[in-house]
Amino acid sequence: EVQLVESGGGLVQPGGSLRLSCAASGFTVSSNYMSWVRQAPGKGLEWVSVIYSAGTTHYTDSVKDRFTISRDNSKNTLFLQMSSLRAEDTAIYYCARGLHDYGDYFDVFDIWGQGTMVTVSS
Amino acid sequence: DIQMTQSPSTLSASVGDRVTITCRASQSISSWLAWYQQKPGKAPNLLIYKASSLERGVPSRFSGSGSGTEYTLSISSLQPDDVATYYCQQYNHYPLSFGGGTKVEIK
């Protein structure tokens, strides 16, 4: 079964750090575009970051220089290292797989995890 | 950055009604647009990509259309299971961006 399972969320103080994990099954993380998308409580969706199969990464401006997306191919797992956390980073964080269609890869998310909650508060 | 504006923000319709949601981009996105359905407490679910391509397993009552800066998601006959919030997303340029969402309710 194709599945993504996030972990690592929790309560952290402003300025603190946290590392989120996303374990994949049924497909290979390193062969796909993989993204993190977040959703603040009661709010809409916000894309955070992507890593391509070739290793190229992109970030939304508000997390640049604070968040780092990476993967461990041996564990088939995606990560999001978050530092200098702010109250506005409080959200459910989803990992998502980019669509692979007719040999091309797209930043459209066909598989999502269940999400992990990150709360930044003192 | 590309801004995505959805309307309406809330929609109430009867079972069997045709429902249409609009998404406008701040610049042309060349049909690189997707639609998602999100039910409370759940992750989003992909419905449509490339503006009008139906994702595998999605009921045929869902359809998408549009080009340039204006796109629509239609539900041909609203069902109780369609109660959810719907989001559009552009993937033409980074940063990727979503619309603010349209909450669909049954009247």
Image (tube, rainbow, N blue to C red):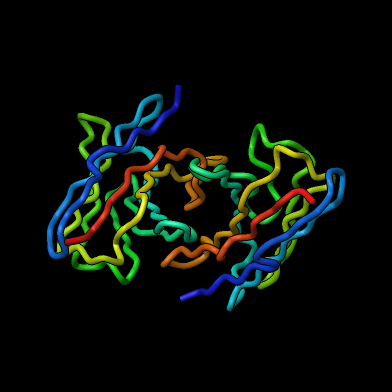
Q: Is residue B38 left or right of residue A70?
A: right
Tell me which residue sits at (80%, 45%) in the image: B78
Q: Is residue B2 left or right of residue B33?
A: left
| Residue in the foreground of this view, choosing between B77 and B26 | B77
Q: Residue A21 sits in which quadrant?
A: top left
Tell me which residue sits at (39%, 29%) in the image: A27
| Residue in the foreground of this view, choosing between A91 and B75 | A91
The answer to whether residue B12 is above or below residue A102 is below
Tell me which residue sits at (23%, 59%) in the image: A120
Give x and y (percent) for residue B87.
59, 57
Q: Residue B34 sits in which quadrant?
A: bottom right
Give x and y (percent) for residue A86.
22, 66
Tell me which residue sits at (20%, 29%) in the image: A74
| Residue in the foreground of this view, choosing between A39 and B58 | A39
Give x and y (percent) for residue B20.
78, 58
Q: As drawn, which residue projects farthest toward the top?
A: A1
Quadrant containing the N terminus of chain B is: bottom left
Give x and y (percent) for residue A114.
41, 37
**Number of numbered discs overlaid on the protein picture:** 0
The answer to whether residue B67 is above or below residue A51 is below
Q: As drawn, which residue projects farthest toward the left?
A: A16
Q: Is residue B17 left or right of residue A53?
A: right
